[in-house]
Image (cartoon, rainbow, N blue to C red):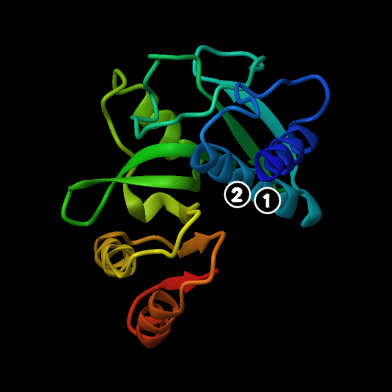
């Protein structure tokens, strides 16, 4: 539970006191970890001078802020999912999401645990009646987040390399809470060939 408490506290700090996250300390640790990575991205954007606003799929400010806990379309209104709008002065607007599907170069859909994409692309997808996925070429950052209590199996690294081949994302990250020497070695050998990073 202490790890869950720490993750949840960090998420709450980033969202601010006026917005409550949909998660509690009894939420799944992997879901909290994805939301934690989302909060790190928001903190980094703020540190670089961006203004952040929070919105939800049905319009307005989300309260509670509902994080996705399974992959879904960006326009899905199954629940009133929240997301962040990131505004860097003089730059196109961006959005940060948890758990959305993104179309790879092959047109196969992939889940991005955490992503930052162009707001224009997100708006276009939302106008598509809920079952349109953003093109990976319009995604600026995508993160594969793995929270494990035991060692990470090597197949996760192999799957990530396949994902890296199909997504045309500016920055693609594999982020985990544990050391994974074999996966780190595998990904390190591929960094020059594929746009992926080990964190």
Q: Is residue 83 visible?
A: yes
Residue 93 screen position, x and y as percent? 59, 41
Residue 50: percent from the left, percent from the top? 75, 47
1 and 2 marks in contact (CB < 8 Å): yes
Dot 1 alpha-carbon crowd within 10 angstroms: few under 14, some 14 to 19, many 20 or more: some
According to the image, label 1 marks what residue?
A: 40
Q: Is residue 138 left or right of residue 84?
A: left
* Helix, strand or loop under label 2: helix
Tell me residue 111's x, y (percent): 34, 44
Could you say which is closer to the camera, residue 152 or residue 138? 152
- At x 17%, y 48%, the residue is 107
Quadrant (top left, top right, bottom left, bottom right) of the N terminus: top right
Q: Is residue 131 above or below residue 144?
A: above
**Residue tagged 2:** 37
- Residue at the image position 64 percent from the left and 25 percent from the top: 24
Image quarter of residue 144: bottom left
Snapshot quadrant of residue 177: bottom right
| The quadrant where residue 127 appears | top left
Please give left or right for residue 166 compared with residue 147 in the image: left
């Amino acid at each position: 539970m202490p790890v869950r408490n720490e993750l949840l506290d960090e998420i709450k700090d980033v969202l601010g006191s006026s917005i409550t996250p949909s998660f509690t300390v009894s939420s799944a640790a992997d879901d909290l970890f994805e939301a934690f990575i989302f909060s790190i991205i928001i903190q980094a954007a703020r540190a670089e001078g961006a203004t952040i606003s929070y919105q939800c799929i049905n319009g307005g400010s989300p309260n509670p802020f509902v994080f996705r806990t399974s992959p879904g379309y960006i326009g899905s209104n199954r629940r009133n999912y929240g997301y962040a709008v990131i505004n860097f002065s003089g730059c196109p607007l961006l959005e940060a999401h948890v758990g959305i599907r993104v179309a790879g170069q092959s047109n196969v859909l992939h889940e991005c645990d955490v992503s930052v994409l162009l707001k224009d692309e997100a708006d276009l997808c939302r106008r598509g009646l809920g079952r349109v996925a953003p093109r990976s070429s319009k995604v600026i950052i995508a993160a594969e987040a793995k929270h494990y209590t035991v060692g990470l199996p090597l197949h996760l690294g192999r799957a990530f390399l396949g994902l890296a081949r199909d997504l045309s994302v500016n920055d693609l990250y594999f982020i985990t809470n544990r050391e994974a020497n074999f996966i780190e070695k595998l990904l390190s050998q591929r960094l020059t060939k594929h746009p992926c990073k080990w964190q």
